[in-house]
Every structure is written in C-alpha cells, then in structure tokens.
Amino acid sequence: MKRYIILSIVFLTASLTSWAQELPSSGSTIPAEEVPEKTPENKPQEPAETLVITPDSLQLQKPIDSTKRKPILEHKLISSAKDYKEIDRINNIITLYNEAKIEYGDITLEAGKIIMNMNTGDVFAYGVVDTADVYSQKPVFSQGGSVVKPDSIIFNKDSRKALIYGANTEEGEFKVKSEVTKRVNDSVYFMKRARFTTSNNPDNPDYYFLARKIKFVPGKKIVTGLVNMYIADVPTPIGLPFAYFPMTNERKSGVIIPSFGNNNNQGYFLQNGGYYFAINDYVDLTVLGDYFTNGSWGSRIESSYRKRYAFSGSFRFLYENQIQSERGFSDFQQTNRYNINWQHSQDAKSNPNSRFSASVNLGSSQFFRQSFNQVNQSATLVNNLSSSISYSKTFTGEPQVNVSTTVSHNQNTNTNVVNLTLPTLQASVSRVFPFAPKEGVKKGVLQNINMQYNLRGENRLTTNDEDFLTGKMFDNAVAGLRHSIPISTNFKIANYFSVGLNASYDESWVFETIDQFLEVNDNGSIETVRDTVPGFDAYRTYNYGASIGTTVYGNWKSSNKDSKIQAIRHVMRPSVSYSANPSFDQYYERLLDEQGLDISEEERFYSRFEGTLFNAPGRVYSSSLGIGIQNTLEAKVRDRDSTKTELKKISLLKSFNVNTSYNLAGDSLNWSPLQLRGVIPIFKNIDLNLDANLDPYALDNNNQRIDRFNVDNGGSLFRLTRAGARFNFRLSNTDFEKAKDGDNKKPDDPLQNRNLQNGGREDDLFGASVDYADGTTFNQEPEKESVDIDKTRYRFKIPWNLNFAYTMTYNNAQRQNEINRQSLMVSGDVELSPRWSVGGNTGYDFANKGVSFTTLRFNRDLESWRLSFNWTPIGPQNSWFFFIGIKSGALSDIKWDQRKQPDPQF
C-alpha cells in the first residue's frame, strides 16, 4: 500500500533533478542579451513574458576547451509569469511571481512564486496569499500523467536533496497527503506523517491510514513505522507497529490474509487464506485453504490465464473434508466432496477455421448443497451439472467440410446418475446440388435436389457419483458410428403451394452386440439372459417423407376513419406432411434357449442391436400423416396521441398453432391427441403462453384409452387431458416513464444487470450469488460515481424493479382432474435512497401449499465502504451473511464479516 504514497514524491524530486542539474552551475551568470529587464512591482501589469534558455545561450563566448564538460540541455527551459520575472545578476537569482510556470520537456511546474538561486542551487516553489488572506496558487508539478500538488517545494540541484511540504497526489486508487518528504539521495527517501485513503474527498476523508515514518528505497523496498487506521479522524486499533513492503512495478507473489469466524457446525474457522503466485504475465495461481476447529478443512486452487488475441480462461478446483459431530458419537460423519470448474474461450480472430472451447463443471453431486464455503445459494437449487470440451475444424472449399470432437458430461444431482461421452465425433460435408445450373436460379424438382453427408460417433458411459472418475465407470460403455446421407428437394405447385420431398439413408456401426436366450432359473420361471458379443457389426435403415404447405392471408379494413381499429390481418399457414419408416425385421430373431428350442409360451423376438449406442432399428412399419396450422393476428390502430397520424401496428395473437397426426399403418388409436399452442400478448412486454392436449378417444373403467371416440361413448368431441399456462415479465420504474420524442428504446434500468455466473438467473428469482471476499453479487453493476446526498435527498423518482414468473399445469389424462403444478415466483429491488438498496426473492407453491426459496438483500453504500446483509430466513438453506469493508480493490483485505452457514445434511 505504501508504494503508492512514495511513487509520486519520488517522481517529483527525480524529475526536478533532471532539469535543475542542467541549469547554469553556481556562480555562473546568464548573458544580458538573453534576459529582459526587471519589471517593478508597482508598475501597471503587463502581458506575461517568457524567458527561453536554449543550449546555445549557456555557452560562453570563448575558445572551446575540449577537456571541459559542456553544459547541455536536452530541451528548452521555458519560464513565464503573469506579474513579473526578476533576474538578479548580482546574486544570480531568478524570481517568477503570480502564476509562475516552468516547462522543461514533459515536465511542468506551476506555482504562485518560483525562486531559483543559481549560487546555492536551491529552487523554491510555493503559493501566494491573495487579498482575501487565502493561501492560493499552490505548486503543481506534473510529468506525463502524474500530478503532485504540494504546499511548497525546496530543492537543491547540486546536492539533489529536497523537502516537499504537504504533498497531495493521486496514484491509482489512492489519494495521498504527506506533511514532509525528504529526499536524501537517489536511493533513500524519508516521509513524515503520510496520510493515504481511497475516499473521493481526500481533504476530509471518511477514513485514512496514517504512517508516522517511512523509509523508501526506490525499486527495492518500503519500511514503515507505526501505521494505523483513522475513521472520521478518530484513531482505531486497526494497524501495524511496523511493516515491510517489497517494491516493484510488476505483479508479485504474496500471502492472502484469511477471514476469521464461527460456524454453527464446524466451530471457529480461518477461511480463504493462502498464497498468490504471480507466475508470469500470462498466468497466475492462487492457493487457498480453510480450517475449522472440529477438524474439518478445505482447499481451493484457482488460476486465470490470458494471451491477448489468442485465448483466455480460468480453472478452479475445490476440495472439502467435512466432519459432523465428534469422533466416537453415533451421529459422527466424515465426507469428502470436490468440484472442478474450467472455462476456456478462444479469440474469434486467432483462427477463424479452428476453435477450441471448454466449459467444465463437475464433481460431487452434493457439493453445492453441503459446502461450508458456498457463495451461491441459487446453485443449491440446480439439479444438473454439465460440462463440454470441444474442438472444431473447418476445411474451406466447395464443398465445405466441418469436423468437431466433443467430450461432454451431464450429472443429475438428485439421482447421482452421471452420463458422459468420451468423446463425440461429428463430421459433415456441406449441401451439394448435383443438378443445379452453374449460373442462375435453381428451378424445378431436379435442379433443387440436394444431398449432404453427416457422420456421428460416440463412446457413451453411464455411471454414478460413487464410481465417477474410477475404472468402474467404463464397465457399461457403448460406442458406435452412424453415417447419414439426407436427400431433399422442393418446388412449387400453382405458385401457391410449396412442396418438399425428402429421404434419408443411415448406416450404423457398432463394436459389440447383445446375444439373448431363454433360461429356466431355480424357481422354474423363464428369464432372459443377455450376453455381450464383441466384434464389429452394422445395420442399415432408410426413411422418406413429403410435405406441402401454403400461406393464406385474411385482411379486414374499417370503413370508419375515426375507428380505433383501422385494419386487421390474419395469417394462416396450413401444412400437411407424410413420413414413412419401413420395417427392418431382418435384424430380428426368435428368442430361444441355448439349444435353439422354444420354451416360451408366446412368440418373442429380439435384435442383437438392442442396447447398443443407437438401439435396434424399428421392426414395425410406420406411416403417418401430419396436419398442422399456424396462425397470427395483427391489427393497425390509431395512436393515443392525436397529433400522430401514422397508424401503429400491434399484435393481437402472436401465435396459435394446432397440430395432430394420423397413423396410416396402425390398427387402432390412429389419431394422436390434438395439440394446441398459443402466445397471447396481455400488456406491454407481458405474454401469456398457453398449451393444451385434446384427446378424441375415450377411457375405459380402468382409465385406459380405448379404440372408441369419446363422442361415441357419450362424451364430448374431445377430452382435455392436459393444459398449461405460463407467463413471466419484468416491471420497473422506467416502464412508466414517458419516453421522449425520438427515443426508440426505454431507458436503461440501473438494476437490470444481474448475476448469470455460477448458476444464477438474470431475474434473481432464486437469489443472487454473493462473493464472500467483498460482499458483492456476481456481475454486479459497476460502482456509481460519488453522489451528493444533499442534492438527492428529496428525489421524487425511486428506481425499482419487479420480476414475476407464474406456471400452472393441469392433468386429466386418466381422470385425475387436478392441478399438479402451480407456483408464483417474485423477485425485485428498490433503491430507498441514493445509497440504500433493498431486494429479495420469494414465491409460493399453490400445489404443495408452501413458500418457496426466499432471500432478502440489504446494501448500503458508505462512500468508501460497502455494507451488505443477505438473509435466507426459511427452508433447509437457512443462513445469513453480514459484510462491511472498503470498496477499493487495493484494500479489499480490510473487512469484517459474519455468517451463519446452512446446516449440512448428511
């Protein structure tokens, strides 16, 4: 921290040395022809004059002695003053008064008065007292982007020693003010009572650190005496009796201070302490650890890497050894859990035809629910962990070839079932039109014929959480390849009907098959025995289909020009499709015993491809006819603003789709249920999604479907077997603000940016992720600039937002006649004042009659500090977290937090 205090002071004195040492040495004079005459102080003020000293003006007019060093200036030394410039050639003193300024290269020194004594080598710069008895025009020293504002400066160009009084500077996030800084030589600097803070008001900061004595060796180290924190000018016991800081402009490795607290299950703890390794400019490493007094412990390894214009990513490994209760007790439990997270992305410009990416999140199924260092409460509600590592390559040309390979992982945290593909190989050749003309538009059936080639191969594994990442997970692995050649064409009939024809040929390769036979067990019953037969095998299938569709427009226009609705447009897109899958019974055999005898009472068949990667081909011939219609409804209405003459288009029905199918090859129950889907706009930005299934067949006394229409069974034309309704929307104060003329979009909501990282949702319906390090939520909006409370105390507009999500499902497939799912989720935030923010989320499950996951958030901006309190009051994740700390990243270790973790569930 102290390095920021010193850098600006050293910068000032070293720069003064660079130009002052090249001024004329003590005792030398400046030629008269280069110096304007003195302007008496009582003379009326004249425009400022400029004194320019060039390298030639410092050379005496006498024969040059090559053995003597010539005074040389790298740049012109330009000085100016508003009132007067006085050059005393007898005493060899230059005085600049009122808005005095010296420029030398990129160095600028401004002050009320500057005095340069060429005999002693002293340079004085300080302010002046104006007519209101106010000390003004304090020195301002700048070089490049660095600015120092002391009360006064005394510098000797010969000894290169300097005294700087009341230096004010800003280095990075720090505002620094020191009473006295003494420069002894190039390698040693001393400072007295240096005060530094990150407050936006350095003259009256809400907090600062005061270092009594500092010794600084440039480029090597900083050694300080007593340093402690002051809050509102009141000293606190937070401090150190002495400190040593290595000094470098590069990243350095160092210790990370742990946080101390008490856990209701594991006892007192030290958490998130460790060591940071600055490996190089491209990669770093952080090793953290947790320790609890009951013996529980955890470790975390984190690394970030980045190479500009090439790639970037991060890796994180977490491991926890959790102990519940005490050894020897009946409820003693010890569990080990881990989680691996890896994110990698490639710059799109690095190699457009080759890309590698990774998104890995795997580990113990209960890690996020039972972790004692959990920062994301919403992650406890996630039921799946998924990962994907992929590489793709494109071979440009005609036709284009795409190849990709992917390693994927999906883990159900409720059932502990883990599915992996190690790997998935995909390849494709772009679509080819063999009969298309070389130039012009493709017309007709023949010219639109196109085909392509696709390859997909997998090595699929299914295991559980216990066997994951062990040799047992490969016991049930299945692998295979599928080649696919789709062929299609399209054309128009009578200019209104679009017709499409399609067919596909597939060939599947497997590397082991399943042999099955019947066997009589010890109980006398017949059971099926499966035996794996290694070796290559293949089967071939094909299918074909056709479709026809058109678009029908219905328009209505009002004859009354004063009517609110001026026109309505109805668009219908009916379509009919046909698909057929032949029977491939050549791949099926009779199920017999080992001797080839039929010992079963019924005729049974099996395929040796059952249980392989792509399963067995279909044995039953299928031929179905699909019928569907899509609808949209729009209207043109008059604007509420009578001054606007242009009609406004609105949507009355965004979509309403009806679909069904008829099985041409079936013997019974040929009609599938009628599926209805609709989206209806209710209000602005609020859509109601509806869906329903209507079954034309009746039920018997056992509530099973029978081959009889419901209307013939004394019922209605259709039975409502399922229905659903869903809507979600967001409201904020900006939705009710009238947009200015010319605005095409509503104002940005300052509270809209929410956490999407680590399983969070944009709407915060399941809570926000809290970082225990600084008490902020992930993807939190950037810090706002300092707000003047007095100017905003009586603000009339309070920013707020609300998110709603409602879902309902009705089930009556077997006469249940029940709503088996109905819930409402709500989340929101409100800024009670410019520095107070309150938010939360909750919900209610109407089907199970209970309150869903609920959290409350309180945040207070304390200018240089941040205060937050997050509380989950009910449920198995009952917990709270309190945090107060400095917002600045440079002082992020200065914080205090307390928490209650959720109770572990072993």
Image: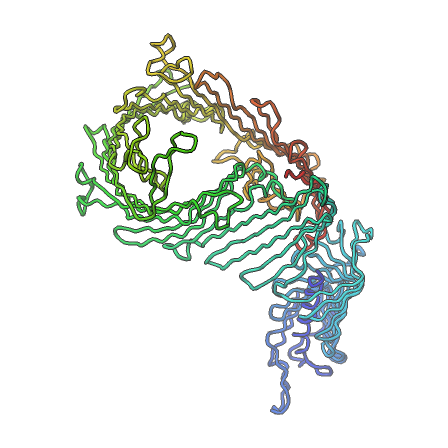
* Residue 451 left/right relative to 43: left
Which residue is farthest top?
A: 714
Q: Where in the figure is residue 481, as x and y percent of width and height?
A: 32, 46
All told, the count of numbered labels is 0
Q: As displayed, is residue 591 above or below residue 287?
A: above
Q: Where in the figure is residue 852, as x and y percent of width and height?
A: 60, 29
Residue 743 visible in the shown view: no
Q: Where in the figure is residue 310, as x and y percent of width and height?
A: 46, 58
According to the image, what is the colour scheme of the structure? rainbow
Residue sitting at 68 percent across and 45 percent down? 323
Residue 738 visible in the shown view: yes
Q: Where in the figure is residue 4, as x and y percent of width and height?
A: 69, 62
The image quadrant where one finds the N terminus is: bottom right
Between 42 and 878, the one nearer to me in the picture: 878
Between 695 and 638, the one nearer to me in the picture: 695
The image quadrant where one finds the C terminus is: top right
* Snapshot quadrant of residue 214: bottom right
Q: As displayed, is residue 628 above or below residue 34?
A: above
Q: As displayed, is residue 345 above or below residue 444?
A: below
Residue sitting at 45 percent across and 54 percent down? 346
* Residue 348 left/right relative to 196: left
* Residue 467 left/right relative to 371: left
Residue sitting at 61 percent across and 52 percent down? 300
Between 114 and 347, the one nearer to me in the picture: 347
